[in-house]
Image (cartoon, coloured by chain):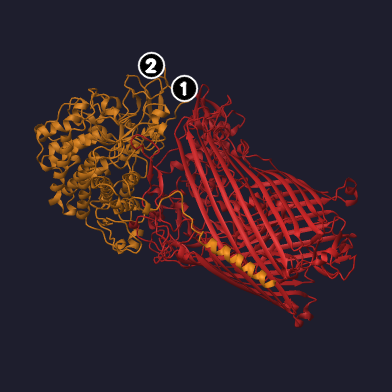
Chain colours: A orange, B red
Amino acid sequence: MKKHLYILFIAAVGMLTACKKAGLDRFPQTSISPNLFFNTESDLSLYVNGLLSQPDRNTYLNDQSTDNVATTAAVEVKNIMAGNANAQNITTGWSWSRLRNINYFLENYGKAQVSAAVKNHYAGLARYYRAEFYLDKVKRFSDVPWYSGTLEPGDEELYKARDPRTLIADSIMADLDFAYKNVRESVPVGTPGKWAVATLYARAALYEGTYRKYHNELNLSSSANTFLETAARISGEIIAGKKFSIYNTGKPEQDYGTLFSSQDLTANSEVILVNIFDLSKSKSQNVNSTVFGDYEQAPAKDLLQTYLMKDGSRFTDVANYAQLGFVAEFKNRDPRMSQTMVYPGWIRVPDPTAYIQRLNKNFTGYHQLKGYVNSTDNAILNGVDFPVYRYAEVLLTYAEALAELGTLSQIQLDQSVNLLRKRAGLPDLNLATANANPDPALQLQYPNVTANAGVILEIRRERRVEYAFENMRFDDLMRWKVGKLLTKSPEGMFFAGLGKYDLTGDGVDDIILIDRTATIPGEDQKEKNSLGVKLIYYRAGLIGTDATVYLKNGNTGGNIVTENATRNFEEPKFYYRPIPQQQVILNPKLKQIFGW
Amino acid sequence: MILSASGFAQGIAIKGTVSDAKTGETIPAVNITVKGTNLHIATNSSGVYALSGIKPDAILIFSYIGYKQQEIAVNGRTKIDVSLSPDFANLDEVMVVGFGTKKKINVAGAIDQISGKQLESRPVTNVLQGLQGISPGLNITYAGGAPGSVPNINIRGYTSINGGSPLIVIDGIPATSNDDMLRLTPSDITSFTILRDAASAAIYGARAAFGVILITTKQGVAGNNVISYNTFQSWAKPTLLPKPVTDPYIFSRVLETSTDNTPWDYVNYNDEYYRWAKERSDNPSIADTRLNPTDPTKWAYMGSNDWYNYFFNNSSLSKSHTLTFSGGATVNEKPLTYYLSADYSRDNGLNKLTADYWDRYGLRSKVGFSPLSWLKVDNNLNIYQTKRALPNGNITDLYYLMPTDVAKNPDGTWANTAAGKLAAKLVDGGNNLQNMFGFQNITSATALFLKGDLQVNADASFKRELWKTHNDSKKYKIGYGPNDIREEGGNGSVTENNGYLYNNAFNVYSTYKKTLGDHFFSAMVGFNSEDYSYSTVNASKDVLISSSLPYLSLTSGTATASAGYSAYATNSAFSRLNYTYKNRYILEATGRYDGSSRFPIDRRWGFFPSASLAWITSAEDFFKPLLSTVSTFKLRSSFGDLGNQNVGDFGYIQSLVPGTSGYLIGGNGQNQVINGAPGLNVDPQTYTWERVSTLNMGTDIGLLNDKLSFTFDYYIRDTKGMLTAGQELPGVLGTGVPRQNSADLRTKGWELSVTYRDRFDLGSKPFSFDAKVFLADSKAKITRFKNDQNLFSNYREGQVLGEIWGLQNDGVFRSKAEIAALDESALIPWGALSIVEGWPKYVDLDGNKKIEKGLSSNDPKDLKIIGNSSDRYTIGANLNMDWGGFDLSVFLQGVLKRDFYPHHYLFWGPYQQPYANVYPWNLDFYRGAADSPEQRAKHSASYIAAGLADANTDSQYPVLQSWLADANYGSGLDIPQTKYLLNGAYLRIKNVSLGYTLPVQWTKKFHVNRLRVFVTGENLYEFSSIKKFIDPEAVNQGPSAWAYPYQRRYAFGLNLDF
């Protein structure tokens, strides 16, 4: 009997074990195996849509690295110029995960059972993203390793050296060319199509062309024209395609500003690619508190002085232009200035009266309007669309590329830059006049422009003005090799000295500057202006003293100063960034270049 | 069937009384087992038992905790009175080991058993709170005092770089997560057994690599019917909190000073503000809110608040009620037992403004019966519900509030300050409710054959839980001015998450035991299988139609839905063989073969063996002369090799993860996309178990008739093949490095516990006393890791876990010349602060006139090891005494060595950033020169009195620059350094309880067998140098010690038995 029991027991355990062994597989229910994917067009689209990456309204804050803006933020280039930078503390920009995601698609899309045209459309988009990825890498590091496929841990390729800039640039062009030829024109709104690809294509070519032309440390100037020609050709094709036009309803005082404060840009003729925001669809963004000019950044005087007068003449030709106060310097200017910065008399919702510029230590006194939404309605604040690519850029690229090639004609100028001037209500730019009389102020800024200088400088002015606070300036300064412009500390409003000032343009004083050693009186003792409103008191003094506003000459006036740090732009080193030290330790073949 | 004891039919009836051999008092609830059968009964409240149908040649076993077990042959007698003698070392105590029990003296591993009684007087609503510091090597650390929180549970220190915590087994079935312990009613528990060494834990295989906690719940016994009611009521307040400066003038002036010294001069209070601050500082009775003089449509504030009093409750009420019916009867000469309990507990948080509690409703029904004489069936059903309510806002945000804030405007609206907004968010901003309802039913059968020599067990457990969480966020109103009340907090939203947990577990095992002369053999084989899945459905929708109706259907915005899924299954076969010779040589071997769904098919199975050996030296003849002093001497040793399957459920399966696009594609939201390439989670070629092998050596020594006993264990635990990024790879790989079984770790440690038990007469009444003190230590070191450059960014070979690399402080710079002589520019936070007199100065260890942080231990530059943050020398002490109806227990717990380098606001105040508090210790900052007389005239009396207008060049803290200790950047004072390293050691009086049991002769009149009342205090006091800053346990929360406050509780309660 005992034996029976044992047998029974062992059999029972054995059976249980046997039938359970097969049941140990568990599979995820919230992710999918690659073997079951990449079959249909919808699979390809699901993946490529996941690669979508677009700048948003934070772009309006991205000029902090340039001479357009004074900032209290610790931006990289400021830290570098302060002299404390090395490969150990400059460690950003070496992320490669996006490239892996792109290349993974390019390795797998081919097995889909769809027509070649469909495949090429999606492959084109992936290559467009890859070009964008590598363009950023070239801007930072110049030479970087090129990878066209995903890597595995054992791959020797992980340890390869940098590839030369020429190889990277040619590969970027090849990717963009493929994308331009294969990506469809008609795509879901909010995603890149053929013309968005073309815009990046032209932008990349212009970047590389001008970069090679001006950066003699690369010894690549002989190939600059090839890229400039591509830039001119592609932008010319976009123009010839006539799909887009400058947004101009004949209202120079507001058409330009509309582009940055619209709830819906999807139907705007100027917008080639849009990043859509809509609070009710859970996609919202509000940069009001940072962009306005008293938290982290404020417009610099140098930018204001670049705007022309309304009649097309130069502000810097006005007598005494450097000693004009806030109200005076906004008079009769290019209307885009008042759509980009807060102007005297501007009213901030929901205040009943005009906004009085607030002067804060380390700020310029100017306030940025581009990117600011003058409303308190949450749905409006959060629902403003962002123009990722504007047709204006294509026109500026076209003109600049041709001008740099030396082949720009008045007709081509009329087809491009002058359309922007028309929208702003400015007179046309004349090629011959410009070349005959280059702006001496701009010549000082861009001494390395020689041939065709007059028109090139005016195109650069147009570009700086049209794209102020749209994250174009830093790349421009770099490719034009004028890093030296960054060494000038941004300054602000001009005050002639202590006393009362009108900041709203109504002729009535709003603020009073007293000496920094004086005491601001109590509320009931404060002086009132002719409207019965108390003046706002500031104690003026030199920077670093116990003042509430810093003036260049202390209590005898001058421009507002924002900092007293010295800035040094080392050429050509500071046009490039070091590879993070950790990466060099891991792969010694990654050598630092340009003195890093 | 065949082997059934036919004797039952014609057995005899036996009666008797069990009493204490020394005092003669009768003992209730003594367990009486008829050897070789399933028949158990107990003595009743008068110590009397009655058995019937017993074979005349049967043997009765009498056992009771604290007394030596007795085996008595019936020999045909019908009345057997028994007196039991004390067993001070509890050597006869029956220890629960995996799939069986064992007498303590026969245990060869490192096992500790705690009686559930120990928690009886503790004002704790869950067993986890009670287990802290109760057993050597068991480390329970709470990251904060929020109600219903689950602590980190650990046995024997650092386990693996992938983590790994002990396996919890409740009534023979592995728990699915540590929070299963929250569901248990503390008074339902008979015992906790902690298996620390690998050989003891080995029977549980792959999940037991880092020890096992076995929890056994109570069972009714025939013969002893008891109705118990236990309750307590407690009042809690926060233990220790960092108390900031509340004087508005000192706070404001110091905060401004901190940014004046930086290029970002953000804090600028005007003269008018300071006038008001001074007035309020000099005369706090002046109102703290007024209309803004420059803008009378808005309020202006000048508070002097200690926010802890506003937000925290100082007498937060928690309570617990438990009602139990336990007992059994003999029906047809077979016992029928029952145990029924119902419990309600509320663990209340410290939030004074809004609901913040954790509730449990529990019901347990245990019924046992013998349908056949050789078969016993038990059904153990537990039904439970827990509920956690908390606000949508985070109460720990109060650490950010400035004293100058005000919470409410004079018109009763919430103030336009961070404090007002936090309070508004807590009260009106929405709620979070987490509800869980579940049950677990375990049916067990025990069959005995061959006169009890062969026992076959089977357990089937079914557990299902429904998890339901509701979260809503609502708008709230903030008063900006008397007629300017604005709504804030977005559009409102509702999120509902429903989860379903499914868990089945089966055990089948059989044990054969045989004694042949001096030889005892036992063999056990078994099979176990488990199946687990947890799936969730999540739905949310925004834009509430009405803030007062936060329901999913009453919203008008975007709806989103998602799902979650996790699952695993394991199958195991296991066996244990034991051989004992002459009750003094014990040899045991265990093997377990485990399969887990978490590994690829071809590396799914692992075999994990272990062996242990014990020698009861004191049982040897040669030891006899020593027995009068050394009553017990035992040597033990064990070795085991276990697996750790603590890795992701589907880690080896590469897959594409879908998500929702952050862009409005085609103008529409909620576009499904694929989130890029599959990650290289693991290397599928090699992925398998981590192996953990532990060598344990121990001894048990009993002195003075075992009144004084020592237990000591030493162990070496090797965690091998830890899954980790095999090596650091260049960033161009573009994804995390796939993990391989490529790192090793060694933990060494020891545990010592000393127990003293005694019982004697004091003033003609018996006095009993016992004390248990233990000390444990462990230290872990990485023994293999692929990091050739020894970079600090990863683990390194030879690295002792917890080591703190830092700079050696060398005072402060006192002159421009000193600054020029030593380049500290690499330490400047944000590259922007300037190095001035009063800046911290460090020793230039590498002598290059430059202070730098090295990147690797090969080239640490000016860094060196300045301390270690691991818990060392954990201590626990438990003293109990009992006399004339009074009982007193004192319980201490602590960590005697650890270092802590502080980061963030709670220590650095404005040195972190100028957006929160100033702490009193921050005021001792470097001031190069005294203020001018005209400046002094502006200051408040408090500011002058605090010496803040005077120079202070011999200060504890350096020059007051904001961002100097910024934890977001990791430079300056955020780099660990010798001067500010704190001693995190502490010893805490965890609990003191005093109880009084009313004399039975009084209570009997009311049919009450026992009425005990008690008062108790939890977390009463702490010895620690770090308590000047924070609660010493807040260190467990992390480097910022940003913890929900711990609770000091005072309680009273009663235990009532009928």
Residue that carries the numbered disc 2 in the rendered image: A530
Residue that carries the numbered disc 1 in the rendered image: A525
Q: Quadrant of residue B710?
A: bottom right
Confirm whether residue B334 shows in the render.
Answer: yes
Label 1 crowding class (10 Å Cα cut-off): few <14, some 14-19, many 20+? few
Label 2 SS: loop
Kindly identify the amino acid type of the residue bearing the numbered disc 1.
Gln
Left or right relative to A340: residue B55: right
Kindly identify the amino acid type of the residue bearing the numbered disc 2.
Ser
Q: Nearer the viewer, mark 1 or mark 2?
A: 2
Residue projecting furthest to the bottom: B622
Residue B865 position, x and y percent, is 49, 63
Left or right relative to B361: residue A185: left
Q: Could you tell me how many numbered marks the image carries? A: 2
Q: Which of the chains bears the disc numbered 1?
A: A
Label 1 SS: helix
Instruction: Classify A349 as above or below B182.
Output: above
Q: Which residue is more in the foreground, A241 or B728?
A: A241
